[in-house]
């Protein structure tokens, strides 16, 4: 099972690094900024999770493979864009799709990782903590990404983001609680997150918010 968790975490690290680096390119950051944003998106949620669990130093410093993958992925995204800059204006829609797709993959993977981390250190009976850490691990890196490029975090305003993470974490936890197979629980939890994010993006689902008032000062 440890090998399975490691595999999905590496997939999530790659996916979030692509998401972060693509957002950095769109925001016209330089090569250093792109690498920093890609790495922050990839490992930021895990660092938050580890700090809350009292795991010091965080896992990213114990297993540098996560940062290495984020570094290589972010660098590759930057170089790919740098040498194809002439076609960039035609790819604005593609940027949005890439960010949303890879963000959904990373989110679905890391909510499982966060829940599993809480369970592995003995908090299985604390459903609130398990769900909170699962959701935080999934959304934390994206929040840091958006803050660093001066955006309101997507989790606060975009397309059923945190709700999707929480729903996936809940499915994973409930299935484990009733005795389901762990692999099947992971797959179902990740599928719920990914499908909700894709449906929300495609159908433009949003949570209710106060409508804009053009007359307001």
Image (cartoon, grey):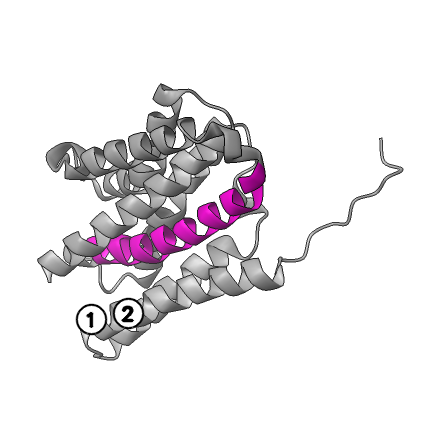
Q: Is residue 201 above or below residue 149?
A: below
Q: Is residue 94 highlighted in magenta?
A: yes
The reply to whether discs 1 and 2 touch (Cβ–Cβ < 8 Å) is yes
Taking depth in this image into account, of 87 and 15 the one nearest to the observer is 87
Q: Which secondary structure, mark 2? A: helix
| Residue underneath mark 2 | 187
Please tell me which residue is depicted at 41% across the width and 49% down the height of the picture: 103
Give percent across and percent down for residue 89. 57, 34
Q: Is residue 40 toward the left or the right of residue 204 in the image?
A: left
User: Is residue 58 visible to us here?
Assistant: no
Taking depth in this image into account, of 18 and 214 the one nearest to the observer is 18
Please tell me which residue is depicted at 14% across the width and 34% down the height of the picture: 64
Please tell me which residue is depicted at 86% across the width and 39% down the height of the picture: 214
| Residue underneath mark 1 | 183
Q: Is residue 72 highlighted in magenta?
A: no
Chain part drawn in magenta: 90-118
Please tell me which residue is depicted at 34% across the width and 26% down the height of the picture: 36
Q: Is residue 192 toward the left or the right of residue 176 in the image?
A: right
- Rounded to the nearest angstrom, the CA distance separating label 1 from label 2 is 6 Å
Residue 108 occupies quadrant: bottom left
User: Is residue 124 visible to us here?
Assistant: yes
């Amino acid at each position: 099972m440890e090998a399975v968790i490691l595999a999905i975490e590496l997939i999530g690290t790659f996916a979030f690094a692509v998401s972060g680096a693509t957002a950095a390119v769109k925001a016209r950051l330089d090569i250093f900024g792109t690498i920093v944003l890609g790495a922050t998106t990839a490992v930021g949620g895990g660092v938050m999770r580890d700090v809350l669990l009292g795991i010091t130093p965080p896992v990213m410093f114990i297993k540098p493979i996560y940062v290495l993958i984020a570094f290589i992925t972010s660098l590759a995204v930057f170089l790919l864009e740098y040498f194809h800059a002439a076609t960039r204006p035609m790819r604005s829609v593609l940027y949005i799709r890439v960010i949303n797709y890879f963000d959904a993959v990373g989110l679905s993977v890391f909510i499982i990782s966060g829940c599993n981390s809480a369970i592995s250190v003995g908090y299985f009976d604390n459903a609130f903590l398990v769900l909170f850490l699962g959701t935080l691990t999934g959304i934390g890196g994206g929040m840091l990404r958006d803050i660093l490029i001066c955006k309101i975090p997507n989790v606060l305003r975009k397309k059923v983001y945190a709700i999707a993470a929480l729903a996936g974490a809940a499915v994973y936890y409930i299935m484990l609680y009733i005795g389901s197979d762990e692999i099947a629980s992971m797959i179902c939890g990740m599928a719920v997150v990914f499908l909700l994010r894709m449906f929300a993006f495609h159908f433009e689902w949003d949570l209710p918010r106060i409508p804009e008032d053009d007359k307001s000062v």
